[in-house]
Amino acid sequence: MNCSFFDGKPELKPDWKAFVLRELNADDARQAEAHLATCSICHEEVATLRLTLDTLSTLREEEMPRRIAFVSDKVFEPRWWQRVFSPTFAAGALVAAAILIHGFIGTSQNQVDAAVAKAVSQLETRHMQEIQAMYEHIEVRDKQVNNMYLSNAALIR
Amino acid sequence: MIFREVEDPDLIAKARRGDVEAYNLLVSRWEKRVFNYLLRLVSNREDAMDVSQDVFLKAYQSLPKLDDPARFSGWLFRIAHNEAFSLLRRKRPETELAGEPRPADLNPRLLPIELSLAVETALGRLSPDQRETVLLKVYQGFKFEEMAEILECPVSTVKSRLYTALDLLKTTLAPMQKAALRGES
């Protein structure tokens, strides 16, 4: 059933969807409300639209599976000279150097094996230290993020 | 002592000067809204998460190009819209195969959680363009003009898509609404 009040002048009929979505300007909204108070047909139309919007609002907001990781930005990547002097690179170079030197001076296989084993051991130790340092860094970052959230929550309150 | 919330434009100004913590705070304010918007558009949690990640990375890289920091939200959602539709275009055949909801999903006797699922299903029946207007208006609260900027189309197109979507949702959700009202009374 349609409201006959605006027959012959449909351009004057309020835009009820814009009305319920709060997109009408103040004057148009006042005129729409005035008509709404006297017209049961338009009242029903608006009530149905509001019910649809209310139903849509029952959609649950989903939690994120994980936080956005922003620390991967380029600014966090080490420069080339930092890579060269990093423990991993240095340890790798040490292993290569040990193999080469022993190859050149013609030492026995046992001596080569011992030198390589020593270099590999140093490499492993340094890897462990690096991993430990990474864990500590992650803990520090976690604390910073938590503090950031707490301070933001305090500011919002 | 009165605390003033740090406004987004202040954070944007700091982030533009290289303050990563300021940008992280900005991310923490917007990530859930962007994620939920993307989730309803692409209908897959992992895709939504990956695209969210891309959106915030692109936003950070493009921050110097943001003309008016007061319009950050619309600008951010425009990036999200472009990323989501780029993904949808790449995955179209797969989405079309999996995207058709089953009539059995719409049960007229509903609990609140089922009502939420019914709404999700009803939204899934809309075209991506129609669905996006509902997401931006109903769930993100943007004005028609802001939506037109995000979607890069005239306001008349925004209204047409949204009004058609609301008519379709009204029809689809009517049985659930009546059932819910009966349950309340």
Image (cartoon, coloured by chain):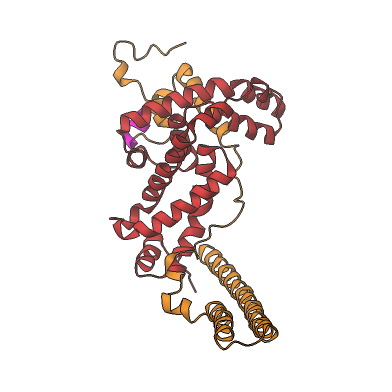
Residue at figure coordinates x 28%, y 55% from the top left: B67
Residue A33 at least partly seen: no
Q: In terms of depth relative to the viewer, which is nearer, B75 or B1?
A: B75
Residue A60 point in image, percent of width and height:
61, 41
User: Measured from the top left, where is residue B13 in percent x and y?
Assistant: 35, 66
Q: Residue at x 41, y 36 (%)?
A: A22
Q: What residue span does the magenta drawing correspond to?
A: A25-31
Magenta stretch, main secondary structure class:
helix
Residue at image x 43%, y 12%? A2
User: In the rendered image, which quarter is residue B151 located in?
Assistant: top left
Q: Quadrant of the C terminus of chain B?
A: top right
Residue A70 image offset from top left, x and y in percent: 49, 62
Judge by depth and name the residue closer to the eye, B3 or B159: B159
Residue A48 in the magenta stretch? The answer is no
Judging by colour alone, the chain drawn in red in this rendered image is B
Residue A145, horizontal then vertical, whole percent: 56, 68
Q: From where the camera sits, is residue B136 visible?
A: yes
The chain assigned the colour orange in the figure is A
In terms of depth relative to the viewer, which is nearer, A62 or A22? A62
Q: Is residue A27 magenta?
A: yes
